[in-house]
């Protein structure tokens, strides 16, 4: 059974908080004025780090993906092409290199 964990990006503080408890565990992510909450996917990278929605990962070929919530599946969106893959398509070794809130530069945004 998948472990249910959350983390939250706190914009006012500019930091990520882990171990967030929610009253409504059915939601994968939600936005509010004070926090943006993301759920642990149940997946790990090649270094056994826990992957959360919003993480940016890179495979051994240098291809970067954002982990997105597909409601019934974890999706990997190629940052360069926008192509969506399911987790079973991403069998290559990969590692978390950041997340969409703390590391926007990894998305190619200014």
Image (cartoon, grey):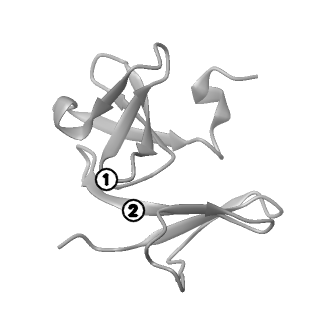
Q: Is residue 24 above or below residue 59?
A: below
**21 horizontally vs 96: left or right:** right
Residue sitting at x 59%, y 26% = 107
Answer left or right for 43 relative to 71: left
Marks 1 and 2 close (CB-CB < 8 Å): no
Q: Circle 2 sits on which residue?
A: 40
How far from the left and from the top, in percent, is residue 32? 74, 65
The one of 39 and 104 positioned closer to us in this rendering: 39
Q: Quadrant of the N terminus?
A: bottom left
Element type at marker 2? strand
Q: Residue furthest bottom?
A: 23
Side of 44 where 31 appears, left or right: right
Is residue 5 placed above or below 52 in the rendered structure?
below
Q: Residue at x 62, y 38 (%)?
A: 103
Q: Using a 10 Å C-alpha cutoff, classify the residue at mark 2 as few (fewer than 14 neighbours), some (14 to 19) or many (20 or more).
A: some
Mark carried by residue 99: none
Q: Is residue 37 visible?
A: no
Q: Which residue is mark 1?
A: 72
Residue at 44% from the left image edge and 43% from the top image edge: 68
Within 10 Å of the Cα at label 1, are there few (<14), some (14-19), or many (20+) other Cα atoms?
Answer: few
In terms of sequence position, does the residue under pointer 1 or pointer 2 come before the other? Answer: 2
* Image quarter (top left, top right, bottom left or bottom right) of the C terminus: top right
The vertical placement of 57 against 29, above or below, is above
Q: Residue at x 42, y 41 (%)?
A: 67
For discs 1 and 2, the disc positioned in front in the rendered view: 1
Q: Position of residue 19 (x, y in %)?
A: 49, 77
Residue 42 vertical placement versus 60 (above, below): below
Give how far across and how far down residue 84 sits, in percent. 37, 27
- Circle 1: element type: loop
User: Residue 77 falls in which quadrant of the image?
Assistant: top left
Q: Quadrant of residue 10?
A: bottom right
């Amino acid at each position: 059974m998948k472990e249910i964990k959350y983390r939250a990006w706190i914009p006012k503080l500019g930091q990520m908080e882990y171990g967030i408890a929610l009253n409504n565990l059915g939601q994968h992510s939600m936005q509010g004025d004070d926090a943006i909450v993301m759920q642990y996917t149940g997946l790990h990278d090649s270094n056994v780090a826990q992957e959360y929605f919003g993480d940016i990962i890179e495979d051994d070929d240098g291809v970067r993906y954002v982990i997105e919530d597909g409601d019934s599946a974890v999706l990997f969106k190629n940052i360069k092409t926008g192509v969506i893959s399911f987790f079973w398509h991403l069998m290559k070794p990969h590692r978390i290199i950041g997340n969409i809130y703390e590391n926007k530069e990894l998305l190619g945004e200014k």
